[in-house]
Image (tube, helix red, strand yellow):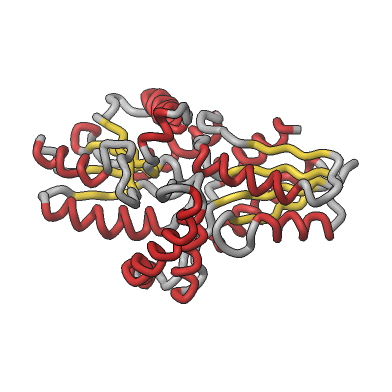
Amino acid sequence: MKKKAVILLNLGGPDSLAAVRPFLYNLFSDREMIRLGPSFMQKPLAFLISIIRAPKTRKAYSLIGGRSPILQITRQQAEKLNNALQPHGEFKVYVGMKYWYPFIRDAIREAMEDGAEMIIGLSLYPQYSRATTGSTKRDFDYEIAKHRIPVVRFIKSWYNHPLYIQAMKKLILEKIRGFDTKDFYLLFSAHSLPASSIEEGDPYEKEIHGTVEAIVDALRDSVQEMPAYSISYQSRTGPVRWLGPSTDEEIIRLARTGIKRVIVVPVSFVSDHIETLYEIDILYKELAERYGIILERVGSLNTHPTFISALKEIIIKAL
């Protein structure tokens, strides 16, 4: 049997306050993530933006422990997945990040040093976008090409996988237990993208809607009456037109319609990081309070057993 390496691929995040500025530089240098003027200006503008944004971003990270928890959580996911895969062959699970250590190249190098004969890259972005999974695959393919690996797989989208949907459903049901469905509003919040990407054919928005529709269909079997809900987008950066409505705009709109309790469901994130712990739990919660709304959040997938089972099934199917 071939020795199989599974590499969990994610965004990454600064592991200290000192790492914030170089992390931001790596992020904004990626033209697939966001286009900053003509291509020859991408890195100079990324350098300038990273300097300007670093103080504010450091302050945000200081409020959630001084670093991103994404590496620690992804390593925990890798450990759980590694254990789940053992009955199915000789697997070892690694972690490769796009914008901070350990980088994708580090994970592939480690897998090769361990004697991997097959490498499977699994994007931890459930919904495909050129800016996230597409950019990650570009780096993955570039690094893979440096090695002689007989078998390579890359899993780029699993937005409606049944076990992923079931894991999301379970987290929502845990949060709304004890509430009457008329007493709250579900707000599905996803990371935003420049609108130009969607206009150029990026499937991200369609896959976000596909995820939400699948979750809602699953919830209908477990609640007497489906609560009202909508989709919004968060984490806009830069002076371009973004996919909307934005989550902060949607909170204000709901307040003006008389909604008193909003439960936010993060649908494009598989682990806690700055977008959940700071943007939703702190910024949006404070905004909601100013408008007379109680805002709560459904827990992140992190190492939820059903989510780990989903990742296992996705890997097995890819083989």
Quadrant of the rendered structure where residue 17 is? bottom left
State the residue in front, 158 or 36.
36
Q: In the displayed structure, would residue 150 be above or below residue 69?
A: above
**Image position, residue 176 (x, y; %):** 31, 41
Identify the residue at horizontal 44%, vertical 29% (top origin). 200
State the residue in front, 143 or 303.
143
State the residue in front, 303 or 242.
242
**Image position, residue 10 (x, y; %):** 56, 51
Q: In the displayed structure, would residue 116 be above or below residue 221?
A: below
Question: Seen in the image, is 97 located left or right of residue 278?
Answer: right
Number of callouts: 0
Determine the residue located farthest toward the bottom in the rendered image. Answer: 18
Residue 12 seen in this snapshot: yes
**Image position, residue 208 (x, y; %):** 42, 32
State the residue in front, 68 or 140.
140
Quadrant of the rendered structure where residue 259 is? top left
Identify the residue at horizontal 90%, vertical 41% (top origin). 1
Quadrant of the rendered structure where residue 122 is? top right
Identify the residue at horizontal 50%, vertical 35% (top origin). 127
**Image position, residue 153 (x, y; %):** 73, 37
Identify the residue at horizontal 39%, vertical 41% (top origin). 193
Residue 86 seen in this snapshot: no
| Quadrant of the image containing the C terminus | top right
